[in-house]
Image (tube, grey):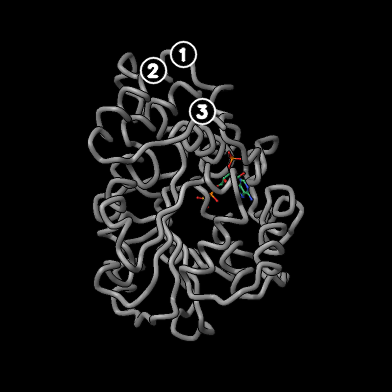
Amino acid sequence: MCTSKENAFDEMYQLIRPFHKLHGILVPEFMTADHFDSLATVQLDASDVWISTFPKAGTTWTQQIVKLIRNQGEEDDVQISKSVPWVENSNYADIDIPSLPKPRTFKSHMPYELMPCGIPNTTPCKYIYVTRNPKDVAVSLYFHYQRSHALPDKKIDWNLFYCNFLNGNVEFGNFLDHVLSWWPHRNDANVLFLKFEDMKRDLRAVVARIAHFIGADISDEIVAKVADKSTFKAMKANAAANYSWSKTDNPGTTDFMRKGEVGDWENYFTAEQSEEMDKVCREKLQGTGLDYTFKI
Ligand code: PPS
């Protein structure tokens, strides 16, 4: 249980590269305030589509879908992180947004009110927010910390990570606060709110919804083609979509395209942790109408 870990934050953040707060949100230090603030003057366009998520909720999957829809189902060999850049990440600061060919698609992990380049209800763009049940997000993010943030040869204990996740002491803060920043806007005309589990259940239906939302006129045949090229298996085998280019200091850790399942959390959560997370979700989501599927 998390309550027994009083120093969880200090304990875990000694094992990983430096993090800091960016406008109140915990992020890796490579995301600088200078870069973020410079985005405020970027001119957005009505054809821009943003994909926003809490990390590990289905970002890359949705990036791939939008990219394929906008390309009539045709692949290219451009890495997804270049085709659909992560805007607030200073590592991509050399990407000149104004010169990118339109229509442009962007990735962000910011909550609603901190979206780069403008709060969604003040811009002409469309936003796809994707969420996933928090137990699977926690497990996926745990492996991501191990692979991408842990100092060489350092291993993070699952119980320690779980505790930090529950307390909102992970990148992009508290998972439930993040989703609840977007949830009230789910019916806004320029927001499409999606769930990872629905994508797993019926990928073609979600591809069709996304195409309709972004105003792409594609046939049922192209919808099927996009869905076929966006399955976990297809993306894992696709060198432009599987992040095989992203290097780790911790050999032996998992691939970015790890499992892509609903319910893998059962292999890591103890019964007490699962109950604790259920309780926190119940308390925080009560009356909002938002719920999650933990198993399909
Ligand atoms: S990131 O780092 O925030 O951009 O990560 P993100 O892309 O949001 O999430 C990575 C997890 O999504 C899984 N994934 C998929 N699952 C099913 N189908 C497809 N096509 C797919 N593509 C990516 C990926 O495997 C990570 O989840 P886990 O549970 O770790 O496998």
Q: Is residue 150 visible?
A: no
Q: Give amino acid for label 1.
A: Ala
In the structure shown, which secondary structural element does the residue marked by tag 3 occupy? loop
Q: Say whether residue 288 is left or right of residue 143.
A: left
Q: How many marks?
A: 3
User: In the image, residue 287 lies at what x, y percent?
Assistant: 22, 36
Residue picked out by circle 3: 156
C-alpha gap between disc 3 and disc 1: 20 Å
Residue 38, horizontal then vertical, whole percent = 32, 73
Q: Residue 268: which quarter of the image?
A: top right
Which quadrant, please, contains the C terminus? top right
Q: Which residue is mark 1?
A: 271
Mark nearer the N terminus (3 vs 1): 3
Mark 3 or 2: the one toward you: 2
Q: Which numbered circle lies on residue 275?
A: 2
Estimate the spatial distance between the alpha carbons at disc 3 and disc 2, rounded to whole Å.
22 Å
When asked about the image quadrant of residue 83, the answer is bottom right
* Pick the front one: 238 or 212: 212
Q: Secondary structure at mark 1?
A: helix
Q: Residues within 10 Å of mark 3 (few under 14, many from 20)?
A: many
Residue 295 location in percent, x, y? 54, 30
Whether tag 3 and tag 1 are in contact, CB under 8 A, the answer is no
Three-letter code for the amino acid on which mark 3 is drawn: Ile
The residues tagged by marks 2 and 1 sit, at their Cα atoms, a distance apart of 6 Å
Q: Is residue 47 above or below residue 149?
A: below
x and y percentages locating residue 273 in the rendered image: 42, 18
Q: Circle 2 — which element?
A: helix
- Residue at the (52%, 32%) spot, across then down: 139
Q: Which mark is residue 209?
A: none
Look at the numbered discs 2 and 1 and tell me whether their residues touch, using CB distance below 8 Å: yes
Amino acid under label 2?
Glu
